[in-house]
Image (tube, grey):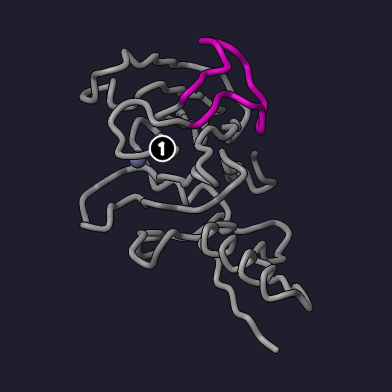
Amino acid sequence: MRLQNKEVLLAWPLALHVLTAGYYYSDGSLHRAIDLRTNQNGNTEKPVYAAEGGTVDQIQSWDGRTTTGMQSYGNMIRLCHADYRDKPLQTRYAHLSRICVQQGQQVREGDLIGYTGATGNVSGAHLHFEVIWDGSRRNPLVWLDDDFTTADGGVYTYGAGEGPVPRENAASALQTLCIGPASAGDVARLQALAAELSLPCEVCG
Ligand SMILES: [Zn+2]
């Protein structure tokens, strides 16, 4: 969406916001995208939502074997949004299992456009998400809010001078839950869920 100050705030393309790789990989090499976790309880096909309204300007179907060049994206969708500062703004969603839109289709922010998967050049299922402004792949986190966690401390987030899009509503999106009293068995299950979501979890009392 466009904020009142004309800045862009993109919507997260998945319901789960756990980064497994940032704009740089943990070895320092350039990724120019973020990777988002999709695997929960072995289910890796998660709905993918349009990060902003726009038009489907590129669709690619994976050939089922090639993992180089454009085919490395696997099944892929690119959306073209309204210009930002008079330059084109696009978002790309890769390694999908299914595509639910057609070339030229108009979408609204939050519309279902496909499902995550493991097509193209992947070692496991995840969503590869790019933000392309003025023809160059930018750090997607600079176009999103701060409502995310990282899979581990080695995941790159922001460079010097970079940060999330400031919220118009200043309240933090990060929240803390307090649950209980709970049985020892339920505590173990909640701890396992927290570990799966990469959330810090502390048992007290
Ligand atoms: Zn990626």
Residue 115 falls within the magenta-colored stretch: yes
Where's residue 184, x and y in %?
68, 76
Q: Is residue 111 visible?
A: yes
Tell me where residue 34 sits by quadrant. Answer: top left
Which amino acid type corresponds to the residue marked 1 in the rendered image?
Ala
Q: Would residue 11 appear left or right of 128 to someone viewing this image?
A: right
Q: Residue at x 35, y 23 (%)?
A: 74
Q: Which residues are magenta?
A: 97-116
Q: Residue at x 64, y 66 (%)?
A: 190
Q: Would residue 31 appear left or right of 142 to someone viewing this image?
A: left
Q: 58 or 15, which lies in front?
A: 15
According to the image, label 1 marks what residue?
A: 125
Q: Residue at x 53, y 38 (%)?
A: 43
Where's residue 145, x and y in %?
58, 54
**In the rendered image, which quarter contains the C terminus?**
bottom right
Q: 106 or 18, which lies in front?
A: 18
Looking at the image, is 156 positioned above or below residue 136? below
Q: Residue at x 46, y 28 (%)?
A: 88
In what quadrant does ligand 1 lie?
A: top left
Where's residue 172, x and y in %?
67, 66
Where's residue 203, x and y in %?
63, 81
Q: Is residue 129 visible?
A: no
Q: 102 or 120, which lies in front?
A: 120
Q: Residue furthest front?
A: 185
Q: 169 or 182, which lies in front?
A: 182
Q: Would residue 179 appear left or right of 55 to someone viewing this image?
A: right
Residue 61 falls within the magenta-colored stretch: no
